[in-house]
Amino acid sequence: MAQNLQNGERLRPVDLARAHGLSTQAIRNYEEAGILPAAPRTPHGYRTYTPLHAAALRAFLALLPGHGHPTATAIMQAVNRGAVDEAFRLIDESHAQLLDDRRTLQAVESALSDLQPTTATERGAASDPVAHSGAGPDGTFIGRLARKLGIRPATLRKWERAGLVRPRRDPRTGYRVYDEADVRDARLAHQLRRGGHLLEQIAPLIAQVRAAGGLEPLEAALRDWHGRLSGRARAMLTGAAELEAYLRARG
C-alpha cells in the first residue's frame, strides 16, 4: 500500500473535490473519517493525494446510493484498515436487507391480491373481545415486533396513534398484541417510511389494505417501491465494481 501511495501523480484536495462536485473540506473530512486512506504530507504540512485516493473516493461515492452513508462509511473504513472480510460482511448484510425488503414487497402484494372487501360480519367478528382474548400462538408483542423491524417500540406506539397499526390489548396484562394483519400493516408502514412517505400519506394506504376496496390507489406506491428496490440493486452493482477497482489498486 505504501508503494501505491507514492506512485503516480500527486493530487491536491481541490483536484479530488472538483472531479465530484465536492468541497475541499469534504475531502479532508473523508480522510479524517477513514473513508480515504491517510494522505502523506509535504514538508510544509500540505496533504498530498494520489490516484489511490481518487479510487477510494470513487468507491465511496459509488457505494452511497446502494448502501447508505453509515454502511458505505463502515465499508471503506474496514478496507482502509485492512479488514477486508469485515467490509464483505457489511456488504452481505446490506444485500440481505435488500432481499428482505423485496420479500416484504412480494408479501404485501400477495396479501393485497388475496384480500376481499371487508364485510359487516367480518368487522363485527374483528371487534369481538372474546375472539381476541389472550395473545394466542400468532400474537406478537411490541418489543419483539420492534426488534424484527429494527425500530423502537416508541415508533410503533406513534404509528398506533396515527392509525397505521391497531393492536389489541391482552386482557390479563394490558400489553399490546399484534396479530398477523397488524404485523403486515407494520411492515408496510415501515417500508413506506423508509421510502420517504409521510405518516399522513401512509394512513390512507393502510386503510385501503384493510378495507380492500381495490388496488388502484396503491399501484403508484407499489410501482415506486419496485423502482426503489431495483435502483438500490443496480447501485450496489456499481458500488461493487468501484470497490473492486479500489481493492486492486491497493494491491
Image (cartoon, rainbow, N blue to C red):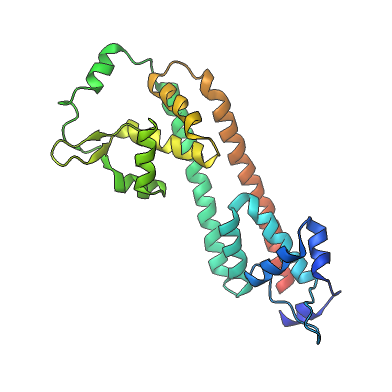
Horizontally, residue 46 falls left or right of residue 199, namely right
Q: Nearer the viewer, residue 39 or 112?
A: 39
Q: Nearer the viewer, residue 248 or 81?
A: 81
Q: Residue at x 69, y 76 (%)?
A: 38
Give the quarter of the image for residue 82: bottom right
Q: Position of residue 200 (x, y in %)?
A: 48, 30
Horizontally, residue 118 falls left or right of residue 132, namely right
Horizontally, residue 205 falls left or right of residue 210, namely right
Q: Looking at the picture, does residue 195 appear above or below residue 36?
A: above
* Residue projecting furthest to the right: 9
Give the quarter of the image for residue 84: bottom right
Is residue 184 at all visible to an observer of this figure? no
Q: Residue at x 81, y 87 (%)?
A: 43
Q: Position of residue 217 (x, y in %)?
A: 52, 20
Is residue 6 at all visible to an observer of this figure? yes
Horizontally, residue 108 falls left or right of residue 47, namely left
* Residue projecting furthest to the top: 120
- Image quarter where the C terminus lies is bottom right
Q: Residue at x 58, y 25 (%)?
A: 220
How many badges with numbers are in the image?
Answer: 0
Q: Position of residue 245 (x, y in %)?
A: 73, 63
Q: Looking at the picture, does residue 178 appear above or below residue 109?
A: below
Give the quarter of the image for residue 39: bottom right
* Residue projecting furthest to the left: 172
Q: Nearer the viewer, residue 1 or 130?
A: 130
- Image quarter where the N terminus lies is bottom right
Q: Looking at the picture, does residue 216 appear above or below residue 53?
A: above
